């Protein structure tokens, strides 16, 4: 354990994380991530909370949609569909983030000289 | 207790013991003990996460709640499911990239402060113990019903089994018990749903039409509002579900059992599909139980509706299916409590003993011994408390666990990864304000105080109106962290740069063990 810590400190001396964070490729990476994660998170939280809010304060979801199945069930099922769709969307996006991260890591280990 | 029940019950016990025997051989280091050496594949870990989620509460509880309250029972399914998106988008990958064994490790990747680690460990222990007592009391009552044995004996059986898994097999045994159970449970659910749909001639529209007249609630059965009539109460519950699940320690721990963030991601994806399908199936089970078992029979077996799924199994497939579902329910309880023991023990042995008392200098052997001693201690404590709690109404413990997880754990996770200005004092105040507000508000809520004698722990008027105070305590957790941060000048930008790079790229310093 003690040995591990020593080794850890040695490597960390070599990497200047502040410089990495300042680099244009890392900044771009963070921006791309933000642009993806924040809007989608807001979207799914709003979509989610809309269900209890609508069922608590209104009754229009109780109107029939298909036969005896009312809108509230369709909305509930849409939550499942949304989860699965976002799951697929996330995987796709995350793969491209992985590539960006790998490029940054490569540069960082070479000495991190990009500006 | 029929012979089939006994045979299947013993088969489950035997199978889990065989798993533990093989797992024990592989458990040599602290890393093996806490995280199965980080060696689970995405599929395995995804199934194990599903197993953690599909506790007796979601399997038996939700099926029962839908059977009795129709749409309102389905709220739980939706809350648990969307919680996955929170985990996937915000928590899983940074957590895996920064942490080693526990949540405290992850927070401490940014702050080397003993008070931060101590507070995080305190939260983990509190949540684990409370949640475990609730599970054990529920398990005792349930096994009493399923197998007709005494409560104390039921608690002891579950308690001894969970202790054996964790003590000898650590995370490897716990994970494999969880995986086996998740597969068995899904198989059982699919068979039952198929049989229910068969009775409705595979016509979903017809099923809804029939359900309008199948219960005493009439058409209202298919509308929200049978169980949750307080708008703010419903919203607060939904908030606790969506954020709390992402902060439960035994769920968080599951992200350390894989090699890297990519595997963590693929395990979340497997889990999302498995759990999504599972929760769709709870609907068929709930409707089926309401239609083919009937409200009065469900209520007679257990007022909370927990017997709806096993009774439906009996109605659909006779004694064999009943025995199978009961045995799976038993396995479910065992696996979830084992996970809880492990997360509680990791906070004691790794955070408090290994990192705070021994300052990270404990030898590998000392760490494993400490982990085993802590597991034993946590198990014994939970068993003793559960034996005393038989006649207490412990429903509040579950909402408490979720509330603390949402109010104390989630704000600090998000701040640590995403907020540049965040500092040591902020981390401590975020966790303490979340913990204390959740504890205090639940203590004065209707879950603890009810004017009706016996309906809750104490008789009296509740001071705070919401059963589940997440709507107030979560903002307090975030506010506590914010105020604690801005009132302290301390701010280590250099360290944040490091955390930011590591959290987002998965870069590990060469010294880190995995």
Image (cartoon, coloured by chain):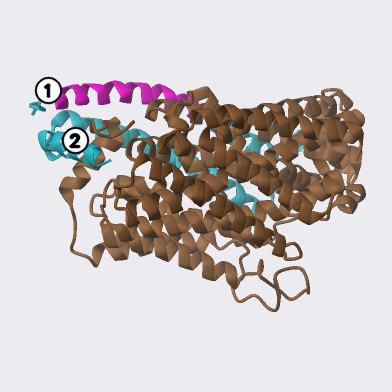
Chain colours: A cyan, B brown
B469 on left or right of B428:
right
Residue B60 lies, in percent from the top left, at: 74, 43
- Does the image show residue B248? no
* Disc 2 from disc 1: Cα separation: 19 Å
- Toward the viewer: B381 or B58? B381
Q: Quadrant of residue A4?
A: top left
Q: Which residue is mark 1?
A: A110
A15 on left or right of B175:
left
The residue lying at 48 percent from left, 26 percent from top is: B40
Q: Which chain does the numbered disc 2 sit on?
A: A
- Toward the viewer: A103 or B366? B366
Above or below, comparing residue B333 to residue B39 in the picture: below
Region of the chain picked out in magenta, as a range = A84-109
B11 on left or right of B334:
right
Q: Which residue is mark 2?
A: A7
* Residue farthest to the bottom, as pictured: B460
Above or below, comparing residue B132 to residue B317 in the picture: below
The residue lying at 18 percent from left, 60 percent from top is: B490
Above or below, comparing residue A109 to residue B60 in the picture: above
Q: Secondary structure at mark 1?
A: helix
- Does the image show residue B67? yes
The residue lying at 62 percent from left, 41 percent from top is: B164
Q: Is residue A99 part of the magenta span, yes or no?
A: yes
Q: Which chain does the numbered disc 1 sit on?
A: A
Q: Secondary structure at mark 2?
A: helix
Q: Is residue A8 part of the magenta span, yes or no?
A: no
Quarter in which the C terminus of chain B is drawn: top left
Magenta stretch, overall SS? helix
Residue B91 lies, in percent from the top left, at: 41, 41
- Mark nearer the N terminus (2 vs 1): 2
- Toward the viewer: B238 or B183? B183
Q: How many marks?
A: 2
């Amino acid at each position: 354990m003690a040995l591990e810590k020593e080794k850890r400190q040695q490597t960390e001396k070599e990497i200047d994380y502040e410089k990495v964070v300042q680099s244009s490729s890392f900044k771009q990476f963070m921006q791309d991530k933000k642009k993806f994660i924040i809007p989608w998170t807001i979207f799914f939280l709003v979509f989610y909370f809309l269900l209890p809010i609508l069922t608590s304060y209104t009754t229009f979801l109780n109107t029939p949609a298909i036969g005896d199945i009312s809108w509230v069930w369709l909305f509930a099922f849409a939550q499942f569909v949304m989860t699965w769709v976002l799951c697929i969307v996330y995987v796709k996006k995350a793969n491209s983030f992985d590539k960006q991260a790998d490029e940054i890591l490569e540069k960082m280990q070479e000495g991190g000289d990009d500006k | 207790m029929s012979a089939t029940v006994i045979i299947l019950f013993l088969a489950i016990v035997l199978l889990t013991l065989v798993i533990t025997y093989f797992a024990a051989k592989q458990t040599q280091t602290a890393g093996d003990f806490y995280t199965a050496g980080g060696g689970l594949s995405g599929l395995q870990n995804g199934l194990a996460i599903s197993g953690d989620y599909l506790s007796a509460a979601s399997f038996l509880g939700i099926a029962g709640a839908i059977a009795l309250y129709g749409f309102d029972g389905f709220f739980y399914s939706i809350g648990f499911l969307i919680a996955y998106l929170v985990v996937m988008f915000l928590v899983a990958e940074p957590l895996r990239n920064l942490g080693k064994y526990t949540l405290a490790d992850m927070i401490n990747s940014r702050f080397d402060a003993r008070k931060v680690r101590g507070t995080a460990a305190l939260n983990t222990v509190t949540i684990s113990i409370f949640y475990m007592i609730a599970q054990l009391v529920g398990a005792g009552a349930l096994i009493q019903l399923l197998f007709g044995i005494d409560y104390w004996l039921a608690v002891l059986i579950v308690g001894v089994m969970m202790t054996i898994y964790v003590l000898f097999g650590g995370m490897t045994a716990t994970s494999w018990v969880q995986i086996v159970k998740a597969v068995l449970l899904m198989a059982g659910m699919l068979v039952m749903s198929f049989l229910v749909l068969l009775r409705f001639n595979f016509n979903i529209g017809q099923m809804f039409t029939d359900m309008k007249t199948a219960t005493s609630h009439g058409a209202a059965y298919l509308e929200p509002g049978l169980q949750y009539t307080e708008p703010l109460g419903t919203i607060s519950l939904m908030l606790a579900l969506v954020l709390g699940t992402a902060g439960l320690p035994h769920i968080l721990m599951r992200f350390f059992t894989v090699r890297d963030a990519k595997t963590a991601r693929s395990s979340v994806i497997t889990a999302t599909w498995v759990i999504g399908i599972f929760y769709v199936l709870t609907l068929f089970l709930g409707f089926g139980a309401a239609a083919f078992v009937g409200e009065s029979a469900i209520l007679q077996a257990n007022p909370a509706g927990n017997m709806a799924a096993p009774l439906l199994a009996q109605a659909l497939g006779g004694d064999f299916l009943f025995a199978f579902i009961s045995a799976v329910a038993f396995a479910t309880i065992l696996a979830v409590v084992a996970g809880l023991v492990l997360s509680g023990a990791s906070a004691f042995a790794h955070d408090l003993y290994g990192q705070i008392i021994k300052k990270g200098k404990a030898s590998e052997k000392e760490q494993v011994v400490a982990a085993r001693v802590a597991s034993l201690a946590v198990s014994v404590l939970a068993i003793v408390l559960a034996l005393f709690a038989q006649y207490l109404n412990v429903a509040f413990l579950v909402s408490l666990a979720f509330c603390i997880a949402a109010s104390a754990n989630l704000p600090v996770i998000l701040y640590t990864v995403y907020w540049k200005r965040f500092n040591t004092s902020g981390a401590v105040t975020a966790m303490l304000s979340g913990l204390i507000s959740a504890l205090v508000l639940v203590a004065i809520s209707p879950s603890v105080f009810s004017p009706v004698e016996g309906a809750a722990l104490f008789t009296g008027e509740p001071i705070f109106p919401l059963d589940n105070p997440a709507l107030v305590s979560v903002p307090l957790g975030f506010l506590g962290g914010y105020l604690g941060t801005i009132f302290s000048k301390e701010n280590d930008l250099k360290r944040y740069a490091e955390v930011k790079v590591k959290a987002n790229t998965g870069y590990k310093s060469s010294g880190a063990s995995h």
